[in-house]
Amino acid sequence: MLVSANENFSSYRVFTAIFFRDLTVYFRYRGSWINPLFFILVVITLFSLGFGADNQALRVYSPSIIWVTALLAVLLSLDSLFKTDFDDGSLEQLILSSQSLYLSVLAKILAHWLVTGFPIVLATPLISLMLGVSLEVLPELSLGLLLGTGILSFIGAIGASLTVSLASGGLLLSLLSMPLYVPAMIFGAQYLQDAIAGWPLMPSLSMLIGLLLAAVVLSPLAIMAGLKLSVEA
Amino acid sequence: MSLRSGQGLHVAGSNGSGKTTLLKIIAGLSNDYHGSIGWRCSNELNPVIDKSDLLYLGHLTGVKSLLTPLENLSWWVSLCLPAYPIGSDEITRALQQIGLNSELNTPCHFLSAGQQRRVALARLLVSQQRVWILDEPFTALDHSGISQIENCIKRHQSSGGMVIMTSHQVVSNLELIQLNLADYQQRPN
């Protein structure tokens, strides 16, 4: 009993150490969390300018616009998820830690999501104003982006772990992640569409939640293998 | 080739002869090899060293340049020695002992290469691991730094620890078994 309690405490200590270290690093390097937010706001501004006065069209296309820009914003930020750790050798120390790499990976992705995906969720009111989406669906829109950016971060991290040892793996990362993103994209946009049109939400919402849970539980396994391969190379 | 408690191994060889690769294989970071590695007399049963017994310090030290020496070392302690109650005063003392006094709270990218190396080497002072694998630990260190690390290795060996290291510096002060990779290289026919 005592041993297992100690084990749990050790895992917890490793998890929080990685989580808070990554947050500290992100906050000292502001570009990491300002870039995705800035990107999504700029693209959505351009879209709303491009559509001009045609509010009706904007409202019809806004679910896919929101999803595509969120997807690209997350994808752009993922390049840096393991890169600095790989470059300075922290990744080797992570892999050699006696505690489970699974939790370390989970901590890293959570910290990364908190500084890249979560600001996008916080910016939802601004996004829906710019796209002319009624503020009544704001809770649904935020929930959709909350689940969506989570799915995108976890799935994209698989690609990031595989391309971390490449000097410029950005393009390969997009190529690897795109097919995996398709289900999330389809159900995510569907959910927003349903919310805006006032249709029942349960089917697409449960698919999104299912995708998120599967991504959280399963993607660290692939990421662990990817990181070990990258360090070995 | 076998290593007992208290012994050390110095892997020598010219550039590109595979010293780092060998250390990575022993540390369990690479599976790309033929042959077998044993740990605690077991051959092949558990081929890699227990992670809780291993301190690996590679070319890339794992020191984050945006963090301060204190943050770097306490992160490493939580990561690699989570079960040991090593407090922040002990971490501060280790960093001071290795020669970082006024720089404790300065982000590492303001420090010189030698000082950054010292931040990484301060791990040796708090280490509880039995096996140290050090890849070129003396790079960028000055004379006093080198002798400090040598003393550290001696103390580790005398308390029953093992060291496997590479170095282009002369390590005559240390009692190490020499392993020259040139003896094992395939000669071109």
Image (tube, grey):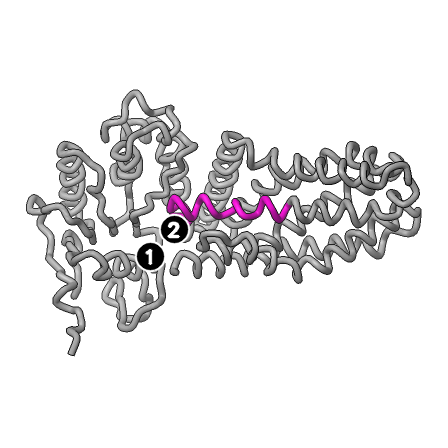
Bounds of the magenta segment: A74-93
Residue B79's spot in the image, x, y percent? 41, 43
Question: For the point 44% across and 61% down, which residue is it?
Answer: A229
Where A158 sits versus B34, above or below? above
The residue tagged 2 is A92
Report if residue A100 is visible in the image: no
Q: Residues within 10 Å of mark 2 (few under 14, many from 20)?
A: many
Which amino acid type is shown beneath numbered disc 1?
Answer: Asp
Furthest residue in direction top, as rendered? B102
Quarter of the figure with residue A219:
bottom right
Horizontally, residue A152 falls left or right of residue B108, namely right
Instruction: Looking at the picture, tell me which residue is in the foreground, A72 or A141.
Output: A72
Q: CA distance from mark 1 to mark 2?
A: 15 Å
Instruction: Looking at the picture, tell me which residue is in the foreground, A12 or A152.
Output: A152
Chain where mark 1 sits: B
Query: Is residue A87 on the magenta stretch?
Result: yes
> Residue B50: which disc?
1
Report if residue A181 is visible in the image: yes
Horizontally, residue A198 falls left or right of residue B156, namely right
Residue B53's spot in the image, x, y percent? 30, 52
Which secondary structure class fits the magenta region best? helix
Residue B41's spot in the image, x, y percent? 23, 66
Query: Is residue B75 on the magenta stretch?
Result: no
Question: For the point 37% across and 24% down, which residue is it?
Answer: B106
